[in-house]
Image: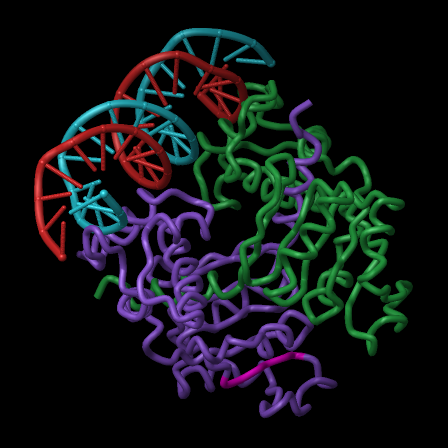
Chain colours: A purple, B green, C cyan, D red
DNA sequence: GGATGTGAATGTCTTCACAGCT
DNA sequence: AGCTGTGAAGACATTCACATCC
């Protein structure tokens, strides 16, 4: 049951979960792979295959029970527990993230924010105090953050990553516009806005005829 | 020369370009596929294959001339012209984007910002005035934005997309945490932070013992 | 009858390995 | 000798199609 599952599959499972939560709100008791497929812009076979990596959740002839599937997906995605998150870099992206509605709801709890700028250190950020990045290493050793968000300039990203890894962080969300290298047991997701926009630029430049 | 090229390839080309620009700054005249591969966390064969979709840019035995390859990649990615960008939704993400350093440098020019909140409409945002989203349709018809950024709440995203498409926008960057559907000749990239974090959550929950 | 679950077929992307320039 | 460019092989992901069960 714990094979190698593609990133794209995990991503779609997240999507299905969000649809299911909406459907649940509208009081739907059951849903077919076909409906989920339409919502997610994919095919019913894809939906069934995605789920099949983790078990059999449906009933033939009926579809999937919405509340049960929600629970199963939360389980699969690791969303039935809280994750301690710290944000390094108190810039615009950091702010946007910490205040993203539904972020805490999903179990991602921002418990600390760091910056290197003396003007920002010590300022209050909703319920959080911006801490000095100099304390990041010792804090991380003590607090055991599950996930760290890197939202610092490109030049500083690798250094911050090294500190986090050294202190035992196993998951990093990287918003810096640069690659960071980490040991194989640490998982990194890099969100690079520039790349996304250049993808659009490419598509526009090459649009058929 | 204009085959179907994978998204992942385009993404890597963007990455290579950013490395090349750095290398160029350090005065490197030439670079091998192997070096680019290391920087990008891939293989030299992958780098050569990616480039080969668009032509032959290297010299056997020597590698690639840095300035020439930069120009070629900019050409391929459509970065030798300016793109007119509008941002719909003057929230945190919108602000972060409009002020992202290097965004304008790359040719993405934010020329308008919209919001539906009367408190925000009319406020000054650096050199931009926040406009009423009610004028989005007529403005778009007049201004012909190349790329529109949707940074509004999930419920409003599809409606905004419809207005943009109707007015002729062909590329949309969607930051709303919901899927939007558009005709096939319109390209959409959705960046869904929740999905990214749930990917990390999944990885943590399933990390090999 | 209706919708799942899944092997098999197909399609797509990556890696290999080597011929061919410089 | 060194490094690119590229068919061919291999790995991976998606789609098909149908037996299976409610």
Locate the C terminus of chain A by quadrant. top right
Pinpoint residue B29: horizontal percent, then vertical percent.
68, 33
Q: Residue at horizontal 60%, vertical 68%?
A: A151
Would residue A203 be seen by someone viewing this image from the given angle? yes
Pinpoint residue B152: horizontal percent, then vertical percent.
67, 65
Toward the viewer: B127 or B162?
B162
Residue B47 vertical position relative to residue B99 in the rendered view, above or below: above
Per the rendered image, the range of residues in magenta is A111-116
Specify the quadrant of the image occupied by residue D20. Answer: top left
Pinpoint residue A164: horizontal percent, then vertical percent.
46, 73
Asked if residue A155 is among those painted magenta in the image, a careful observer would answer no
Specify the quadrant of the image occupied by residue B99. Answer: bottom right
Locate the N terminus of chain A by quadrant. bottom left
Main SS of the magenta segment? strand
Toward the viewer: D4 or A147?
A147
Q: How many marks?
A: 0
Pinpoint residue A189: horizontal percent, then vertical percent.
47, 59
Would residue B29 be seen by someone viewing this image from the given angle? no
Specify whether A12 is left or right of B36: left
Specify whether B54 is left or right of B74: left
Q: Residue at horizontal 45%, vertical 51%?
A: A40
Specify whether B159 is left or right of A180: right
Q: Residue at horizontal 30%, vertical 50%?
A: A50
Q: Residue at horizontal 40%, vertical 73%?
A: A169
Residue B45 vertical position relative to residue A172 in the rendered view, above or below: above
Toward the viewer: A110 or A114?
A110
């Amino acid at each position: 049951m714990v094979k190698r599952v593609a990133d794209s599959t995990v991503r779609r499972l997240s999507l299905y979960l969000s649809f299911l939560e909406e459907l649940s709100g509208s009081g739907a008791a059951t849903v077919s792979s076909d409906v989920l497929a339409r919502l997610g812009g994919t095919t019913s076979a894809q939906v069934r295959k995605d789920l099949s990596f983790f078990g059999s959740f449906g009933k033939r002839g009926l579809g999937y029970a919405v509340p049960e599937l929600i629970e199963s997906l939360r389980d699969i995605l690791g969303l039935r527990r809280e994750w301690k998150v710290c944000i390094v870099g108190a810039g615009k992206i950091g702010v946007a993230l910490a205040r993203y509605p539904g972020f805490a709801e999903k179990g991602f709890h921002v418990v600390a924010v760091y910056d290197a700028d003396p003007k920002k250190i010590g300022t209050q950020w909703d319920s959080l105090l911006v801490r000095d990045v100099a304390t990041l290493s010792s804090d991380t050793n003590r607090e055991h953050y599950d996930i760290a968000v890197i939202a610092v300039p490109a030049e500083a990203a690798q250094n911050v990553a090294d500190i986090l890894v050294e202190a035992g962080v196993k998951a990093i969300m990287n918003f810096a516009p640069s690659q960071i290298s980490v040991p194989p047991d640490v998982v990194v997701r890099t969100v690079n806005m520039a790349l996304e926009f250049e993808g659009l630029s490419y598509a526009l430049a090459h649009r058929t005829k």
